[in-house]
Image (cartoon, rainbow, N blue to C red):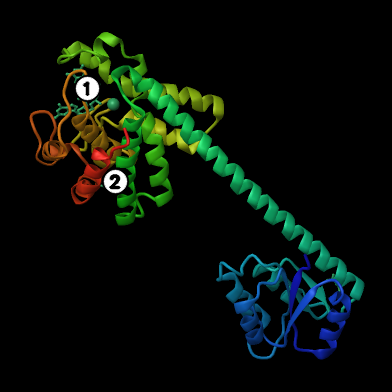
Amino acid sequence: MTYKILIVEDSPFHIDLLVSALGTDYDLLIAIDAEKALQILKKDKPDLIILDAILPGMNGYQFMEILSRDPKLDSIPVIFTTGMDQAEDQIRGFALGAVDYITKPFNTELVKRRVQLHLELDSHRKNLELLVAQRTKELVHTRDTVVQTVAYLAESRDETTGAHIFKTQNYCSILAEELSRRYPDELSLQEAQLLSQASALHDIGKVAIPDKILLKPGKLTDDEMIIMKTHTILGANAIEKTMSMLGENFFLRKALEIALTHHEKFDGSGYPNALVGNQIPVSGRIVALVDVYDALTSARPYKKAFSHEKAFDIIVHGDGRTKPEHFCPRVLQCFIDLQHNFKEVLVSTYE
Ligand code: C2E
Ligand code: SIN
Ligand code: SIN
Ligand code: FE
């Protein structure tokens, strides 16, 4: 493949020098001012730009600013050309993102070498970026699959299915993504997506709860409930242990936060730490509602599954056990507004 180089230069003398240095090895596009260069860039994407700092009309610096604001153009390496001893111009060019400068009058051999060097560097950079993107995708896929498998194993004792974990993650992403649209300062879209994946581990601590409590067909005694409540801390401790082996990791940090805080309640009546309001991290506030919706609409050893309508009614109007004050008002409002999306996931045939 022949590389394409855009030369932006107004002096015919310097154009001739550049053409004689580069013309045999590269496809050259030539513009005698910045406006014409921008015209060319509308149709053509060069691999490198050689830019005169001083041009009639728009100067080279203004031209670079335009490039840097265009995501399709800002990665093209720019070498700019200045007179001898123009240190200030050179520094200004670097500040605007130039990769190098060449001083006039041009030395043909040096121009050749500089251009070759920067084309090679840029091609290495692109290969690395591609490789990193590919590896990251593989890692994220592996992580999400492992997390789902672990969650499935952890919850399989009380008849949890893969479909169930998938649904929980879906409910979380409905709420988290809506919340990040309404309150981008509280939650970024990227974090919303990560939370939804991490939410699968919220009840991981239940692995340590004895069968006779976890699988009890009837109501738990107060003592049994005390033991049951430790699943939050046990889960957080297990994730903490993994983190101490792997090192700090944002995904696990969020999973830990969710395991620990998903039974906290907005009015302060939750456990294990009776946190109030926004002391509860947004991840925990989201999963708290999802968890109750999910428990209500699923069969448990101690209860049968309720319909979407009944679950909605219990969450929004309360019953003896659940009250609307338990939930973050913002999260609750998103649930009310998007309840039909919840119902769609609930009745989805993937089972
Ligand atoms: P879970 O079954 O996943 O329930 C999660 C949360 O959903 C409960 O948290 C509660 O806030 C809500 N929830 C579940 N079922 C109902 C219901 O029938 N009515 C209403 N209004 N809310 C409901 P909670 O209470 O902190 O319980 C945590 C976990 O403790 C439960 O997770 C479950 O594994 C266990 N658990 C709670 N109560 C009982 C019980 O009576 N018998 C048995 N065997 N386990 C229970
Ligand atoms: C320089 O930029 O150091 C001068 C070398 C050249 O003219 O390419
Ligand atoms: C929040 O920041 O998510 C809750 C604050 C509120 O809605 O009052
Ligand atoms: Fe729980």
Where residue 218 appears, as percent x and y from the top left, is: 15, 14
What residue is pinned by disc 1? 300
> Which circle, 1 or 2, is nearer the viewer?
1
Q: Which residue is mark 2?
A: 175
- Residue closest to the far top: 212
Q: Is residue 285 left or right of residue 239?
A: left
Q: Is mark 1 within 8 Å of ligand 1?
A: yes
Q: Position of residue 240 (x, y in %)?
A: 45, 25
Q: Residue at x 47, y 35 (%)?
A: 144
Q: Callout 1, which amino acid?
A: Arg
Q: Nearer the viewer, residue 39 or 167?
A: 167
In the image, is 308 to the left or to the right of 291? Answer: left
Q: Give the mark nearer the N terminus: 1 vs 2.
A: 2
Residue depicted at 18% across the width and 36% down the height: 326
How many C-alpha atoms fall within 10 Å of the one at disc 2: few (<14), some, or many (≥20)? many
Measure how far apart labels 1 and 2 are at the Cα level.
24 Å
Please name the residue shown 21% across and 12% down the image.
Answer: 216
Q: Secondary structure at mark 2?
A: helix
Residue type marked 2: Leu
Q: Position of residue 318 (x, y in %)?
A: 10, 36
Q: Are marks 1 and 2 in contact (CB under 8 Å)?
A: no
